[in-house]
Amino acid sequence: MKCTDMELDAHLNTDDATRNPAPGHGPAPSFAGRPKPPVVLQVVPTLVTGGAERGCIDMALALADAGGVPLVASQGGQMVRELDRAGIRHITLPLASKNPLVIRKNAKRLETIIKEEGVDIVHARSRAPAWSAWMACQRTGARYMTTFHAPYNFNSGLKRWYNSVMARGERIIAISDFIRRHILDSYDVDPARIRTIHRGIDPFVFSPDRVSSARMIQLARQWRLPDDKPIILLPGRLTRWKGQTVLIEALEKLGRKDVCALLVGSDQGRTGYRQELEERAKRAGLAGAVLMTDHCSDMAAAYLLSTVVVSASREPEAFGRVIVEAQAMGKPVIITSIGAYQETVIPGETAWVVPPDDADALAKALDEALSLTQEQREAIGARAQAFVADRYTKQRMCADTLAVYAELLAEPAPRQNAR
């Protein structure tokens, strides 16, 4: 891996105006002192777990800090407690339902909420609640915007129409350039309405200095990790497209007996796939070298325990949060050359990039990553941390989204929202 300071600075300071034709990436706007603080209602199906849900909570807190009035509507979940602790109102509605009759009833309920609460912007983050939100905004004149959290694929005209509600926003936030391209390729959308705002991680959580030795020791004991072997970490739920089988095949080709691969993620009931992975590892002579564990609540410590972090995804990722988290923790990473992952690394400088489903290429990258000297490892870690701190923090994500709210509020309301 080679990179001059000048080249690194150029990469970190790439002009985002090429994809974001609006102001952003500066200090978060403040709405304090306005005659009427802006009221923003976010709608999501549930608040159980996930990237859309996490972004919703983060934005509600940021809007409150900026002097606005956040409201959140969902079917509920354990994350509602975070809103309760911050004094942010949550409205329980059956927004996870895809039943057309329920969607229309939700639209009427949202219409009433918009009128009673003086809602200025409705920010939708998923398709079913987005239809209810869009209809309510059409009836009330509230501003309608969306965030594309995934490439919503379609194989029929009906499914494409159903997905199109996410492309009807006066502003459309894409969580990566990959998603932005998907929107433009799939829908008739004016590029000027799209803002690319990458997801952000919390630097106060994902910082090596904030993880104690006690946390690492506790986790290592819980997982019974060997003390004398490099740890190859693949975070992600146990599902075939995450590429766990490709990693096991690569480990077999690597032919090293002094490594331990740790697969961290829930099988979500896919017990057959878990059993398949166990049998594959056993046939490859890796039964003791491949460990599988459930969901981890302390991923910062998990990253610090690792030597290299791998994403072997076989299908495109909309963003790829774990790779950003791993780099924030100063770890070298290996990714596949599809989806948004390539935006979240500096290829050849913080990451190895390999084709998907290519166990030979993955084995070669693993061999190089495991052969790094301590000095090389520290240099990669420093570059990775600087890269993430510049682009992928929660604070930047929230500031850029608040700027979109301010931008939308500064424009005259259209007679009818974009279709």
Image (cartoon, grey):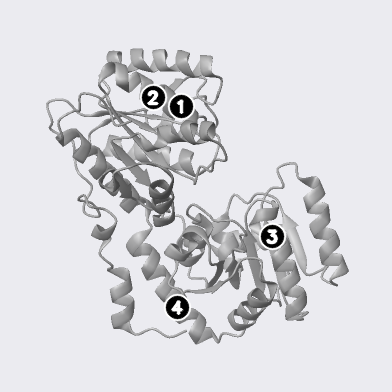
Residue underneath mark 3? 263
Residue underneath mark 4? 349
Type of amino acid at the residue the image marks with label 3: Leu
Precedes in sequence: disc 3 or disc 4: 3
In 3D space, how far apart are the residues under numbered discs 3 and 4 (Cα atoms)?
25 Å
2 or 3: mark nearer the eye: 2
**Closer to the camera, 92 or 276?**
276
Type of amino acid at the residue the image marks with label 2: Ala
3 or 1: mark nearer the eye: 1
Residue underneath mark 1? 129
Percent position of residue 70, x then y: 32, 30
Percent position of residue 214, x then y: 59, 61
In 3D space, how far apart are the residues under numbered discs 3 and 1 (Cα atoms)?
34 Å
Labelled pair 3, 1 in contact (Cβ < 8 Å): no
Precedes in sequence: disc 4 or disc 1: 1
In 3D space, how far apart are the residues under numbered discs 4 and 1 (Cα atoms)?
41 Å
Precedes in sequence: disc 3 or disc 1: 1
Q: Residue furthest front?
A: 157
Q: Residue at x 74, y 67 (%)?
A: 248
| Placement of 321 over or under 96, stated as above or below | below
Percent position of residue 36, x then y: 16, 25
Q: Report helix, strand or loop for mark 4.
A: loop
- For the C terminus, the quadrant is top left
Labelled pair 2, 3 in contact (Cβ < 8 Å): no
Labelled pair 3, 4 in contact (Cβ < 8 Å): no
Q: Residues within 10 Å of mark 4 (few under 14, many from 20)?
A: some
Q: Residues within 10 Å of mark 3 (few under 14, many from 20)?
A: many
| Placement of 390 over or under 114, stated as above or below | below
Q: Residue at x 49, y 52 (%)?
A: 318
In 3D space, how far apart are the residues under numbered discs 2 and 3 (Cα atoms)?
39 Å
Q: Report helix, strand or loop for mark 1.
A: helix
